[in-house]
Each structure stands twice: as C-alpha cells, then as structure tokens.
Image (cartoon, helix red, strand yellow):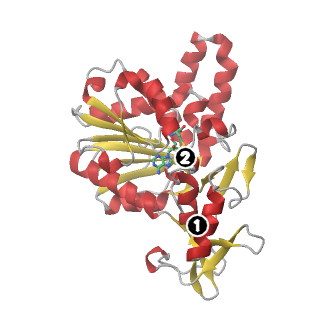
Amino acid sequence: MTLARRIADRIRAGGPITVAAFMEAAMQDPEDGYYRRGDPLGRSGDFVTAPEVSQMFGELIGLWCVEGWLAAGSPSPIRLVELGPGRGTLMADALRATARVPGFHAALRLHLVESSPGLRRRQAALLAAAGPQWHERLEDVPADPLWLVANEFLDALPVHQLVRTADGWAERAVTLAPDGGFAFADILPAPPDLVPDRDLPPGTVVERRPAAEALAAAIARRIAAAGGRALLVDYGYDAGAGDTLQAVGRHGRVPVLEAPGTVDLSAHVAFADIAAAVRAAGAAAWGPVPQGRFLRSLGIAERAERLAAARPDARATLAAALHRLIGAGAMGTLFKVLAITPEGAPPPAGFAAAAPGAAP
Ligand code: SAH
C-alpha cells in the first residue's frame, strides 16, 4: 500500500493529524519515507546543496572547526559529528582540508547521524578512511567535547503550524478532502505549549519546531558541559515569516500534500527560536549571520582565487559556484549560519561582528 493510502487510513481511523505528524510520516516512514528510500539528493536533480556546489564549502567548514579546536586548547579525543551528511561531500572536503593540522585527525572520532540507508552507503564509500560510526540520533554519540556541523538538516525536521483564527490559536492539521485527497484543517484549540507568547492578528501563521529546538538544546548542553563548537547552516530567517512549508520534487515546487514520501518537504528554520533554546540550555548562540558574510570572512574569495590559479580552465565554473554560495539572492542571503560555543568563549571565526545573542 502506498504511503499516501496508509496516511489516509490513519486519518480515517483516528481523525486529522498535525502538519508535523504528516511531515514526520512523509520524511521518515520506515518503509516509504522520503529520507528512507535511496538517495534523495540524486533522485530530485534540482535539490543541490552547498557542499555539492563546491568543495570550498566543506573545506572552509573544516578549517572553522580547527580554529575552534585550537582556541579551546586542542582537546583530545573530540567527537566530530555531522547531522544528515547527505552524500558525505562536506565531511570529505573538511577532512581533506584539515589533514595537515598537527594532532587534529588524531584527536577526532567521526560520528554521522543519518537515517537513510542509501545515503549511509554513499557516506561509507567516501569517508571509509576516517572510520565513521553511524547513529540514528545524537543521544547515541559518547559525551566528549563535541564538534558538530549540520547543513540543511534542521529544515527537514517536522514543523507545527499555529494559525491565529478569530476564535484563538488553532493548530493546522491534515484531513481527508471529499475527493479522497488530503486537505488542511485548522483545529481549535492549539496545544498551549506551542502557542506564541504574544497575540497576533487573525490569519497569522506561526511555525514552531520542537524537535529542532530540543536538538539544539541537547547540543548546547553537551557543549556547555564538555566543551566544543557547533555550526548550524540552513534556509531560514531570524524571526517570524508565516507559512514556509514547501514541497520540492524532481520538477520543482509541487503542492505540499500531494505525494507524501516522494517529494522533499521542508520549512525555513526560525533561528531566533533555535538561539533561544541554546541559551536556555546554558551555551552561547552566535548569529545567525548570512551564509555569504560567513564564508567571505573565512576567506572564500581568496580560496577561489587560489583554486582558479591552479586550474585556469575551471575559472568560470569556480566564479559561478562562488556566486551561488555567497551571492545576494542566492544561497549567500537565503541561508543563515548559527554557531554554538560554551559561554565566555571567544567569537568563533565568521562571527566576530555578531555579539552572542545579538540580532544579525
Ligand atoms: N547535509 C547534506 C544533506 C542535506 S539533506 C548536504 O548539505 O548535502 C538532509 C540530510 O539529513 C540527509 O542526509 C537525510 O537523509 C538526513 N536526515 C533527514 N532527516 C533526518 C533524521 N530525522 N535523522 C537522521 N538523518 C536525517
């Protein structure tokens, strides 16, 4: 039975399910979830992530990790963790760029949090030399100093949508339409713990991501207790942006409820909520800063120039990749970067101008 049929049966038996429950089933159903089947990055050809655009992205993130590791006094061992490594490209580039840093590779143990069996196989092929261990969740990684990176991971975690109706806050849910397809329904009242603190005009949609906030808090608690650094990169905004849920299939945007499990569902990350969760857990949150500004301050333009000097035939390709990663209107402004450090740590590279907790 298709995933859509099984979700429909569940709604028939138990009533409407929240948007978050629909997203969880669509992405992580053990048999038919989008991230459980094959290589989603390959299947939908128009879903290209920053590490797949250019090696420079992973290289600079590797060096960012080293900078924080040196600033922390070169602890050993450390757990180098990537959440949702995709094809393993970012980590492969990061490891290559840091191979000559004395002691860094000897100190690190590589842990990959990945739910897709197909992507785990691709990561294994690329990262075998580093002897990675795979996990379903961060909780399973031993509690040592933590160096964690995640690109386009939080945006795939389930999102709740709260809708301010004339009668108060409702939670958006998915129900069955008369024609047998799926339809949205706003259910009153919304769970009190998800309702925003301040009242907003009727019609306003607010997205909340308890799963991402809990994950950020868990990262922060580890870093507060044992030291470390984390870098979270995602499509997102600093504060409130309404309904950002979208579905992307092989041919671009498709209706959100149309084909669960066969298209990528995501919503922008509310970085202000993530930063608040980090601070409440006792660590410092830096940024978010736009990806373009972050990569420029790490020296991406100089890196591109060096690569182009070594391979003049690739100069145009490199210039295009550089623009895609840092350009305004491209990933440079749409994507944001948030860093987590222990309280009292110096500003991490790329965040010098961003006081901990300050707006971007
Ligand atoms: N970071 C990669 C891939 C981004 S796609 C890149 O930038 O190219 C999202 C990644 O997170 C995929 O590897 C996907 O399989 C993984 N993923 C998504 N939800 C997950 C979950 N709940 N648990 C573990 N891995 C998950």
Crowd tier of the residue under label 2, counting other residues whose Cα lies within 10 Å: few below 14, some 14–19, many 20 or above: many
Which residue appears at 28% of the width and 48% of the height?
223
Residue drawn at x 57%, y 43% is: 37
Q: Residue at x 45, y 80 (%)?
A: 192
Farthest residue in the front direction?
1
Q: Secondary structure at mark 2?
A: helix
Tell me the kind of residue under disc 1.
Answer: Val
Q: Earlier in the sequence, mark 1 or mark 2?
A: 1
Residue 100, compared with residue 216, is above or below; it is: above
The answer to which of 276 and 152 lies nearer the viewer is 152
**Residue 298 placement, left or right of 172:** left
Image-quadrant location for residue 4:
bottom right
In depth, the one of 279 and 30 nearer the eye is 30
Q: Position of residue 216 (x, y in %)?
A: 39, 55
Seen in the image, is 124 located left or right of residue 227?
A: right
User: Is the CB of the residue bearing disc 2 within 8 angstroms of ligand 1?
Assistant: yes
Residue 19 tag number: 1
Q: Is residue 349 above or below residue 208?
A: above
* Residue nearest the observer in this picture, 323 or 40: 40
Circle nearer the viewer, 1 or 2: 2
Labelled disc at residue 35: 2
Res 347 → quadrant: top left
- Quarter containing the N terminus: bottom right
